C-alpha cells in the first residue's frame, strides 16, 4: 500500500479525505429503482423545504440595510437576503468549481472509472462545500452585514453563523438527495430555476406600489400597463410609459425575456446525430446525438460562481480600504437608489465584468460593453472545454462508453472512434459555450428581467426537466409530453 501511495503521490489528497467521510452527512444510494411519481414527490418536497427556508428570517440580526456584495447575483445564486437561504447555492457551486478545476489541471489525480475514487472525490467536494459555508458565514458576520459585531455580541454572532451553517448543510443534503436518483435533476439547477421564475413572475405581476415622483406606480409591468391606461387621460403617453419607464420593470423588459426564452428553446434543438451500430447484433442501428449546448448550463453556473466570489471579495476590500490603489483597480462600489444594500460597481475590474442593464448603457459606455462581451464569451468557452474533460463527457470518455456497449460508428473502424468524436465534441462544447454566453449578453443588453445569465439558467433547466418527463413517459421529444 505504501508503494502505491508513493507511486501515485497526487492521490494522497483524496486519501487524506477518507477518514473524514465517516462523519460527513450522506444520503444513502437507493436500493431499488425509484418510480417516476415518487421522484416527482421527492423533488416537490425538496423544493418546498427550499422555499420555506427562503422565507424564514435569521434570528439575532440587527440590520439588513448594510452593503450587499451579492445584490446583483442573488437571483442566480438562489439566495434571499436576511433569511436562512442567505448563502444560497454559492458554497456548493464554488466547491464544485474549485474541485473540478483542480482535477482538470491534474493537481488532484482522480480516476473516475474507479468507484472508490468517485466516492472520495464526491466526499472531498462535500467537505470543501461545508468549509466554504463556514467561511462565508463568518465573513458575512465579521464584515458587518448584520450590524456591527460589537453591537451583535458574541452570542448573537455565533448563533447567526450556526443558522447559516445548518441552512448550508440542508442545501448540500437536498442537492445530494436529487443527484442520487431520489428526485429529478439536481438541486442546484432546481433552486436557480425556481428563484429566477419567481423573480420574473413577481416583476411582471407585482401589486406593490412605489412612489416614483411621477405619482404612485405598480412594480409589476403588466399591472402597471392596466393601471396607467385606466388612470391617465393621454392613452398614447400611458402606453409609451408602460413600455419604456425607467427604474421599474416595463413591458419591453418582459418582451425581451419572452424572446430570449424562445431563442434558447429553439437553439436547444440544434444537434448532430452520429450513426452508430452494434458490433454483435447485425442490423441494430441507432444515433448518438451531440447537442450544440453540449455542456448545457454548466459554463454559466461556473462563470457566475467566479464573478460572485470576485464581487464579494472586491466589496469587502473596498469597504475596508477605499483609498488603496490595488483595491480600487479590483473594484470601486457606489450605493444604489435602495441604499448600501443595492450598491453596484462603477469602476475597476468588477465594473467591466458586470453587465450593462440596457442598450442606453451600452451606447453610453461601449468599452464596458465590449470588455463584458469578450469576458463572457471567452470564460464560457473555456469553462465549457474544461468541463467536458473533468465531467467524463470528452471524446475519449464517450468512445469508451460506446465500446463498453459494443457499439461502433458506422463507416469507421473501432480504433478511429475517439478521433472521429474528437472532431465534434470539443467544437460543440466551445461553440455551445460561446453561444450560451452570447445569448446571455444579448438578454442583458435588451434589459431582460432576471438578468441574461439567470434566464439562460432557468430555460436550460426547464428544458432538461421537459426531456426527463419525455424520457420517463417514452416520448420522442420533450414537447410531445405537453401536446
Image (tube, rainbow, N blue to C red):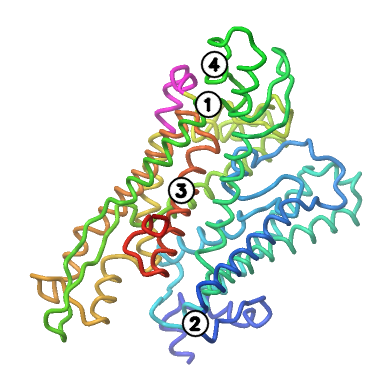
The residue to which callout 2 is attached is: 33
Q: Which residues are magenta?
A: 359-372
Q: Assign a secondary structure to mark 1.
A: helix
Q: Residue furthest top?
A: 234
Q: CA distance from mark 3 to mark 1?
A: 20 Å
Q: CA distance from mark 4 to mark 1?
A: 10 Å
The residue to which callout 4 is attached is: 239
Residue contact at pointers 4 and 2, CB within 8 angstroms = no
Q: CA distance from mark 2 to mark 3?
A: 28 Å
Dot 2 or dot 3: first in sequence order is 2
Q: Which mark is residue 459?
A: 3
Q: Quadrant of the C terminus?
A: bottom left
Quadrant assignment, res 277? bottom left
Residue contact at pointers 3 and 1, CB within 8 angstroms = no
Q: Assign a secondary structure to mark 3.
A: helix
Dot 3 or dot 4: first in sequence order is 4
Q: Which mark is residue 251?
A: 1
Q: CA distance from mark 3 to mark 4?
A: 29 Å
Viewer-side label of 3, 1: 1
Q: Nearer the viewer, residue 471 or 67?
A: 471
Dot 3 or dot 1: first in sequence order is 1
**Residue 360 is inside the magenta segment:** yes
Dot 4 or dot 2: first in sequence order is 2
Quadrant assignment, res 46? bottom right
Local crowd size for mark 4, using a 10 Å CA cut-off: few (<14), some (14–19), many (≥20) = some
Direction from residue 320 to residue 360 in the image, left or right: left
Relative vertical location of residue 72 with respect to residue 16 in this rendering, above or below: above
Q: Position of residue 294 (x, y in %)?
A: 33, 56
Q: Nearer the viewer, residue 77 or 266?
A: 266
Q: Position of residue 392 (x, y in %)?
A: 36, 69
Amino acid at each position: 500500500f505504501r508503494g502505491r501511495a508513493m507511486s501515485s503521490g497526487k492521490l494522497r489528497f483524496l486519501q487524506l479525505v477518507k477518514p473524514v467521510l465517516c462523519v460527513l452527512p450522506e444520503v444513502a444510494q437507493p436500493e431499488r429503482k425509484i418510480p417516476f411519481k415518487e421522484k416527482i414527490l421527492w423533488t416537490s418536497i425538496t423544493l418546498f423545504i427550499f422555499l420555506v427556508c427562503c422565507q424564514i428570517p435569521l434570528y439575532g440580526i440587527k440590520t439588513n440595510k448594510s452593503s450587499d456584495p451579492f445584490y446583483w447575483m442573488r437571483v442566480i445564486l438562489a439566495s434571499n437576503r436576511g433569511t436562512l437561504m442567505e448563502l444560497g447555492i454559492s458554497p456548493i457551486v464554488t466547491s464544485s468549481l474549485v474541485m473540478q478545476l483542480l482535477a482538470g489541471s491534474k493537481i488532484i489525480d482522480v480516476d473516475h472509472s474507479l468507484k472508490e475514487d468517485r466516492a472520495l472525490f464526491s466526499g472531498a467536494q462535500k467537505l470543501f462545500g461545508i468549509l466554504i459555508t463556514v467561511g462565508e458565514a463568518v465573513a458575512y458576520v465579521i464584515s458587518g452585514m448584520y450590524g456591527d459585531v460589537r453591537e451583535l455580541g458574541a452570542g448573537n454572532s455565533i448563533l447567526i453563523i450556526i443558522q447559516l451553517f445548518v441552512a448550508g448543510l440542508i442545501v448540500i443534503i437536498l442537492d445530494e438527495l436529487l443527484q442520487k436518483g431520489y428526485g429529478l435533476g439536481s438541486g442546484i439547477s432546481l433552486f436557480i430555476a425556481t428563484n429566477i421564475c419567481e423573480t420574473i413572475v413577481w416583476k411582471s405581476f407585482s401589486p406593490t406600489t412605489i412612489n416614483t415622483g411621477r405619482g404612485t406606480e405598480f412594480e409589476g409591468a403588466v399591472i402597471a400597463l392596466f393601471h396607467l391606461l385606466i388612470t391617465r387621460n393621454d392613452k398614447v403617453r400611458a402606453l409609451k410609459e408602460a413600455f419604456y419607464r425607467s427604474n421599474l420593470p416595463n413591458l419591453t423588459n418582459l418582451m425581451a425575456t419572452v424572446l430570449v426564452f424562445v431563442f434558447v428553446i429553439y437553439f436547444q434543438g440544434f444537434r448532430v446525430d452520429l450513426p452508430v451500430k452494434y458490433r454483435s447484433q447485425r442490423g441494430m442501428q441507432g444515433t448518438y446525438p451531440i447537442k450544440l449546448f453540449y455542456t448545457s448550463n454548466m459554463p454559466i453556473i461556473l462563470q457566475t460562481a467566479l464573478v460572485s466570489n470576485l464581487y464579494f471579495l472586491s466589496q469587502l476590500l473596498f469597504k475596508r480600504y477605499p483609498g488603496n490603489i490595488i483595491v480600487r483597480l479590483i473594484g470601486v462600489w457606489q450605493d444604489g437608489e435602495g441604499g448600501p444594500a443595492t450598491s453596484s460597481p462603477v469602476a475597476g475590474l468588477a465594473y467591466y465584468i458586470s453587465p450593462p442593464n440596457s442598450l442606453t448603457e451600452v451606447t453610453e459606455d461601449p468599452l464596458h460593453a465590449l470588455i463584458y462581451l469578450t469576458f463572457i464569451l471567452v470564460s464560457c468557452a473555456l469553462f465549457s472545454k474544461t468541463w467536458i474533460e473533468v465531467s467524463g463527457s470528452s471524446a475519449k470518455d464517450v468512445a469508451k462508453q460506446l465500446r463498453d456497449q459494443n457499439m461502433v460508428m458506422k463507416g469507421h473502424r473501432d480504433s478511429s472512434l475517439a478521433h472521429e468524436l474528437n472532431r465534434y465534441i470539443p467544437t460543440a462544447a466551445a461553440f455551445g459555450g460561446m453561444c450560451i454566453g452570447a445569448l446571455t449578453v444579448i438578454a442583458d443588453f435588451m434589459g431582460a428581467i432576471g438578468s441574461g445569465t439567470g434566464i439562460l439558467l432557468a430555460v436550460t433547466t426547464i428544458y432538461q426537466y421537459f426531456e426527463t418527463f419525455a424520457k420517463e413517459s417514452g416520448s420522442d421529444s420533450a414537447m410531445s409530453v405537453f401536446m
